[in-house]
Structures are given as C-alpha cells and as structure tokens.
Image (tube, helix red, strand yellow):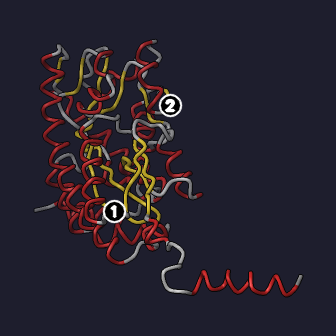
Amino acid sequence: MKLRFVPLLLLLVAAFVLPGTTTHTQAEAGYTLRIASLAPAGSSWMKILNAWNKTLQEKTDGKLKMRFYPGGSQGDERDFVRKMRVGQLDGGVVTMTGMSMLVPAMNVLTLPGFLDTYEELDRVRDKMAGEFESMFDKENMRLVGWGDAGKTRLFSVKPIKSPKDIKSMRPWVWKDDPIFVEFYQVIGASAVRLGVPEVYPALQTRMVDVISSSALTAVALQWYTRVKYMTAHNSAIIAGGTVMRQDKYDELPPEYKEAFDSTAARAHELLNKTIRKDDDKAYEVVLKKGIEAVEAGDAKAEWDAADKKVRDNLTGRMFSKSLVEAVAAAAKP
C-alpha cells in the first residue's frame, strides 16, 4: 500500500512544480471590488460609476472590476460602513454622513452657512487633501475621490422663510446626520429621525413635512412630488465621496493600482462636473413643476445666527477649533 501511495504523491507534487501546470494566482483570477451606494440605478451617479467600471475593466483586461450595489440595496450608509469594517463590502460611494462615521471631523465640510459654494468647497478639498487622506488612513480606509450631491435646501409642504417657521412642522432628519440633528435642536424643532429609504413613505403619510435635500436628490428619489416649497438659498453643499478598505487596495498588483487610481481620478472629476450641472437643471425642473422657491429676505440674519450656533456647539465636540480655522482659511481665494 505504501509503494502505491509514493508514486501518487510524486505525481501530485509534480503537478505543482512542472512548467505549464501551475495553479491560478489571484492576479490571474482577477479582483472584484464590492461597492455600495444609495444612488438609484439609472441616476446620473450610477451612469458615471458604471462607465468608470467599464473603463477600469478595459484597462486591466477584465482582471479588475467593481460590483456596484445601487439604490440602497445594501441598506443605509450606516450599514455600508459596518459591512466595510467587517469585510462584507470593500467600499462605498457615500455622502458626508457615511464619511463622518469613519472620520467624524469630516462634518466640518457640511456645516450650515460655512462652505455654501462649490468654489469654497473645492479650495478646501484641494488645499487640505493630504490632511483629510491621513484621517482616513488611520481608520484603515482609503479616500478614493470626492463627490457631491448638489446644494442643500429645505423642501416643505408649507413655506419656510425663517428657522422659526420649522418649529410648528415635522422635519425629517437623517438619523445618522449629526449636523441637522444639531440644527433642529438649536432652532427648537422636533425632528423625526429616519433612514433615507424611509423618507418617501413618511412624506406620503405626512409623518414628515420638511426634508433637507438637493434638488437633484429630491428628483431622483421622487421626494419633490410630495412637497410644494423649497428654500431659495442653500445652506451647504451635500459633499461626499468614495472610500474603500485600505487593505483591499493594498492587495492589488501595482499595475492594477495604477489603473484604478487613474480611472478613479477621471471618474470623480466627471462626477462632480455632471452632478453640479444636473443639480442646477433639477432646480429649474422643480420650479417648472410648481414648487415655489422661498427667499429668506430680512430673515437671513436668523439663519446666520442659527448656523453659527450649530458651528459653535459642535466645535470642540466633533472637530477641533484649529480644524475649523484651517478650513475657513483654505476656503479663501
């Protein structure tokens, strides 16, 4: 029996060492990055993300690809972050809500009344890129690229001119968004905490009658069909981006990393340009659909005071005073 076993063992060893009989390596088999997003299938975001995936596969002969999970099919952004941490997802295309679950200090970029133009936001992200990337490095996460989702406005069933108008209403707040949680506490409004997938049903039943959103998001998720008014001014930019596990990136061979980085840079540049144009178009669309834009007028000082109170309350608790000052300085031309 031993004599019969030895030739078999030798054959098995030979199968692994003889030329032409090597097993497939990971690089030969290829890599698939699993990335989730709340963006609906067919939306501007997903069209660009899918084009990015196609280009990446072309550059790597199909050996590196991304599998996107759109439309919240993997849950809310809190679920994305949890699944990334345990290895069930490799990355996420998220708003600042998701990014701040990894790095809370990132909320400084979406403070109301702080960075409310694209030009200011771009200057900050460019000048402080290294500092922000190092924050994610400490969490074993890689900041792949920045993305936007339009200008933050309040959409409502009744006109909102000043913050005190919201006190008698039922505003929705993303349960994981500390900025708007704080904002509604500052102005004395009783917010209803819900996940993004729960918003449309809540609008239908009038569980909520005020939502914070960009025009583009309101159109993409059909929220605009349940409201009649929106604030003409925007308080911030809905900033976000793509993040992924650093260890998953580190697994890639050098040539795949290069392909991933170059295509990611181009995709996010195109994403920002497209989304910003589409948000402006969506704003005009909802106006034509009969939604009325309400000007702040002489109530602007009330908005400014509320915004400053939010910033003061969160400084030292969520981000340092030095970071706020650095961002304010970087925002200047």
Residue 274 disc label = none
* Nearest the eye: 243 or 127: 243
Q: Quadrant of the N terminus?
A: bottom right
Task: Tell me: 96 left or right of 331.
Answer: right
The CA span between labels 2 and 1 is 30 Å
Which residue shows up at 33% across the image and 31% down it?
Answer: 212
Neighbour tally class for label 2: few under 14, some 14-19, many 20 plus, Cα within 10 Å: some
Task: Tell me: 79 left or right of 113.
Answer: right
Which residue shows up at 38% across the image and 51% down it?
Answer: 312
| Circle 2 SS class | strand
Q: Which residue is mark 2?
A: 193
Name the spot of residue 310 as percent of width and height, x first: 37, 45
* Nearest the eye: 161 or 49: 49
Q: Is residue 12 above or below residue 111?
A: below
- The total number of labels drawn is 2
Q: Is residue 216 above or below residue 320?
A: above
Neighbour tally class for label 1: few under 14, some 14-19, many 20 plus, Cα within 10 Å: many
Name the spot of residue 71 as percent of width and height, x first: 40, 35
Give the residue type that dot 2 points to.
Arg
Compare marks 2 and 1 and give the one earlier in the sequence.
1
Q: Which residue is mark 1?
A: 144
* Nearest the eye: 201 or 331: 201
* Residue contact at pointers 2 and 1, CB within 8 angstroms: no
Task: Tell me: 6 left or right of 52.
Answer: right
Which residue shows up at 13% across the image and 31% down it?
Answer: 281
* Nearest the eye: 177 or 246: 246
Callout in the foreground (2, 1): 1
Q: Is residue 2 above or below residue 50?
A: below
